[in-house]
Amino acid sequence: MNCNTTQLPYVATGSFSKIVTDYLQQSPSIRPFYQYEPTLQGIKDAILQRQQLPQHRGVLTTALKQQYTGIDTHEAVTNNMALLDKENTFTITTAHQPAIFTGHLYFIYKTLHTVRLAAQLKQDLPQYNFVPVFWIGSEDADLDELGNIWLSGDKLVWDTKQTGAVGRMNTKGLETLVHRIEGELSIQPHGKELVQLLKDCYLNSNDVQTATFKLLNALFGEYGLIVLLPDQADLKRIMLPVFEDDLFNQTPSSIVEKTIERLGENYKVQANPRAINLFYLEGGIRERIEKQGEEWVVVGQDIRFTAASLKQELQEHPERFSPNVILRGIYQETLLPNIAFIGGGGETAYWLELKELLAHYKVSYPVLVLRNSFLIVEEKWEEKIEKLGFGIGDFFQTEQQLLTSLVTRHSNGHLKLENELQAAEELYKRLREKAGHIDETLVPHIEALEIKTLKPLQELEKKMLRAEKKKYENEQHQINAIKAALFPAGGLQERVENFLPYYALWGPAFIRCIYNASLALEQEFVIVHQK
């Protein structure tokens, strides 16, 4: 599999929010909301701060050894786990919920960005070790988002009635989807090995988080990726002071609300805190905790606590308390010797709300690195694009913009009335000047005549363009077909498609291709020319 690449500035794609593009361009309006620039110097500064703060390496490595028990572990993973005990080792982290079969392509991209950045930093800063970590957000309860994938234009949905944390759900019912995938992809060169991998991971695991753990380990173990399941009592115990402060004092919400008030002056806020930012997690329950009078209640459940019983529950069962998006980051940064977080646009946006929160609890704030984004373009589509006289970057425009550009190009500008409009504007300019010398009250009359003259000319130009477009029906169909293939559902490919068809066709070479194409700190959109 040959993978040549070209790059585009993110802003040129028109597919990313203002808060993200301003962050990438280091806009002064957003600078107060993060601590370090996403540069090598920013990494160095983050290391210096992390060295001065408490470490939980023993707790971390003990948990990892337990989690990897019985898992076929690559030597690169074993070596990286050993490195985590060393004071000069730091982590590069990404995080995602346990979407079935990885969900969307960007799941793969953010993972490979993490291992790529860790490898690059080891070259740039050889005095340190850098370990890539995938933090599985297994406590997420949004099954509507996590329980489906798109395959060949069809939405495959996991039919289950389970509730609560998706990671804790058993995998019953996924065999139907695996069978559907097998029927479509097993004929591909690597289809059978892919289907066997899915069966090994999903049909031989008790729950979704274990299946996701196994799949990540199988796909990325050779790159040394450490997969971490934070839904564990011994790990959450280190968060008891923060959890207790949240439950009894609502400190986190008061801090983040002040940040949001400032951030919201210029940007759309990504995540709003609640008075209490913890869920109660038990069995099929993951529901918010609210304070009502002198008691704490689990919303929608017959579960209530007094102050004393809540403190006892927290001490005896920390695994039953699940941090929401406001507290998840501080949990991650407390547990890991982390210096950089790789996330998508939404994740980057909510991390910009957390700087003061982490500072309050004396927890290090990571370098925020926007995850790599890719557009994979097969050779056949590239050839069609070239025949139309476009470049791939042009196809980030709408179909109508592309067609207008093509028609205008072929008509050599004959459809534009720029000269005529300019001549008319010059004529009325002279008329206004003459009339003004005679009688100033005539000027508004001249201006009204100008509007009446120019508007029909502008409408005529549009009609000429529409008439000419009708002559290009074949080209319009080609443009529509290319857009549908490269931008499914009108959005970025990575936000809709799944990695399965690519892996079935190319096997591990697909992973290697994306790894080689991955940028470290360059922060640009990458087009992969697939041949």
Image: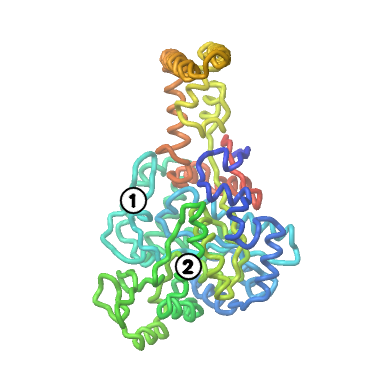
Tell me the distance, in whole angstroms, between the alpha carbons under discs 1 and 2: 31 Å
User: What colouring method underlies this structural image?
Assistant: rainbow
Between residue 301 and residue 433, name the one nearer to us.
433
The residue at 37%/65% (across/down) is 207
**Which residue has dot 2 on it?**
328
Residue 277 vertical placement versus 106 (above, below): below
Query: Residue 407 location, x and y as percent?
Result: 50, 17
In the figure, residue 310 lies in which quadrant?
bottom left
The residue at 63%/51% (across/down) is 26
Q: Amino acid at mark 1?
A: Leu
Between residue 137 and residue 461, name the one nearer to us.
461
In the figure, residue 211 lies in which quadrant?
bottom left
The residue at 39%/43% (across/down) is 151
Between residue 394 and residue 80, name the one nearer to us.
394
**Which residue has dot 1 on it?**
177
Q: In which quadrant will I find the N terminus? A: top right
Query: Residue 64 location, x and y as percent?
Result: 53, 72
Residue 27 vertical placement versus 446 (above, below): below
Say what secondary structure mark 2 lies in.
helix
Of badges 1 and 2, the one in the foreground is: 2
Q: In which quadrant will I find the C terminus? A: top right
The residue at 59%/79% (across/down) is 58
**Looking at the image, is mark 1 or mark 2 earlier in the sequence?**
1
Residue 76 visible, this angle: no
Say what secondary structure mark 1 lies in.
helix
